[in-house]
Every structure is written in structure tokens, then in C-alpha cells.
Image (cartoon, rainbow, N blue to C red):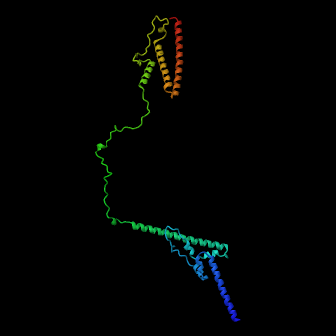
Amino acid sequence: MSSGSGSDCEVDTSTLKSLVENERQRRAARCEGPSHLHLTSDAALDSSCQEPIQTDKAPNIASTDDEIDDSDHDRDFNLADCELNSSDSDDATLAEIKRRHRRRKISSRSAALDFLSIASTSTAVEIVSSNAVTEAEVGSPSQPVESTENSVDPGPDEDLVHNTEDNVDNRGRSRKRVRNEDQWKKNLIRSRRNAGESYVSETGKSFKARALPPPCGPVCPRKCTALISEEERRKEKEFSNGTIALVFACENLHKHRARAIEEARELEAALYAKRQEIAKYEEEIAEYRTLKALLPV
């Protein structure tokens, strides 16, 4: 009985050990990372999880141009990985484990980035210092040599004087009107003739200025000399000459200055007023003559 019971105990103990080992392997297989499969005891598991994180040691970076590889961080065992995959944890514990796991990853990544920036800065400083050349190695600086290719000899002052007459303005031909001398002479002759002044015609014939005709003698049946004085005759002559000049100016505006419409209208109005005044003056002269003829001398 004793031997039988001892063998049964041994069988039960070996079976229990095998079950415990299988349970450990199953738990280790559920954790992230391939290194968890090599853990053999709970003591080793606790000791590896409680080890402090080494922040002074930078990750192994092959090249500065390559991206950061987080595979080395994943190979390190972390208790949060096992706790995160365990099924017997509540929601609050899982949230705390996730936050702790996220903070550890961020801290390790920032440490790697700081090391990368320091390494790149030190490399650039070494390159600049190696390429620096001292003044003693090069030697004393040489004196600057004046280039004679681009130098210009100003020469004497007389050569620099420019004649302003030779500087011709090369602007294009202007559209300024050119005076027509023949037309100008015709207009001048016409204006002098209308004003009663002396002029020379186009054919070369000279005309004297218009003057008052001599007064009628005593043989005049209407007695013009007695009825109309010299001053009235001169006033009538000048008034007629002014009217003729005004008519000529108005016609000239209609023909050659079509753009001055307002001015032409003003001249036409003045001409109309002048004609009305002439008609009134003629009526007064006729009445005066009639009265003089009827009245006894």
C-alpha cells in the first residue's frame, strides 16, 4: 500500500508539474514578442519586469537616413504586455496599463530622436572643423592685382565734351498741322476787304480803303447833306463793315470749325441781334428823312 501510494504521489506530482509548465507556456505564448517564450519561472518574469529602463543608452541606429526601428523596443519584455492580454483584468486596470504602455513607448522614441539629433550635429561640426584651413597653412595673403582688361582710359577732358547740336531727337514725326500759305493769304484778303481796308487781290490788283463818299450838293432833291450829318454817315459805314466781318466769321466757323458748335451758335445769335438793330436803325433814318422833307426849311 505504501509503495503503491508513493508511486501514485509521484505520478500526481509529475502530472501537476507538467500542467503548471503547460500553463506557463500558454500564458507566455499569449504575450507579445518572441522573447516571452524563453521565460521559465514566475520569479524570472517578475525580475525582468521590475528592471529599470535605461534611458542613457541610445538604440542601435544603422544610419541617420533610416527610419527609427521599434523592433528592439518590442523585444524587451514588458509586464504591461502580459497584463494587457490577461482575461481576468477589469476595465480600469486595462485603461491604466494602456496609458502606462503608451507613455513608455513615447519616452523611448523621444530619447532615440534626441540622440539622433545630437549625433547629426556632432557629425556636421566634425566635418566643418576638418575642412577648416588656417591662415598659417595657406600663407600670407597676396596683394590684389588690378585687372587691366576692364579698365577704361578716360582720356583728356576734351574728348568727354559732347556737342548738344549733334544730339538729334529721334522722336517720330508729329501730327502738327502745316500752315497753307495760299489759304492764309486768301483769308487775309477777305478779312481786309470785309473790314473796308486796303488790300491786294490774288491777281495783284490793289484796292484802296473804303471811304465816305462826298456829300450831296445843293442840287440833291432829297437834301441828304441837310438831313444826315457827317457823324451819322460815318457811324452807318462802320456799322455795316462790322456786320460784314461778323457774317464772314460765322460762315468760316460753319465750314472749317465744326467742333466749335457752341461758339458758332453764339455768333449766329449775335448776328441776328445785329441785323435786328440794323433794321431798326434803317427805319429810324427813313422816318427822319420823311420828317425833314415834310418840315419847312
Judged left or right of residue 26, residue 116 is left
Give the answer, above or below, for where 123 lies relative to 230: below
Q: Residue at x 63, y 83 (%)?
A: 21
Place residue 165 in its image quadrant.
top left
Q: Position of residue 91 (x, y in %)?
A: 67, 72
Place residue 17 in its image quadrant.
bottom right
Judged left or right of residue 64, residue 19 is right
Give the answer, above or below, for where 65 lies relative to 252: below
| Quadrant placement of the N terminus | bottom right
Q: Residue at x 34, y 66 (%)?
A: 137
Q: Residue furthest left?
A: 156
Place residue 132 in its image quadrant.
bottom left
In front here: 16 or 191?
Answer: 16
Q: Position of residue 267 (x, y in %)?
A: 51, 24
Judged left or right of residue 10, residue 249 is left
Q: Position of residue 195 (x, y in %)?
A: 45, 19
Q: Residue furthest right?
A: 1
Give the answer, above or below, for where 109 lies relative to 222: below
In front here: 186 or 62?
Answer: 62
Q: Residue at x 57, y 71 (%)?
A: 105
Q: Residue at x 57, y 74 (%)?
A: 74
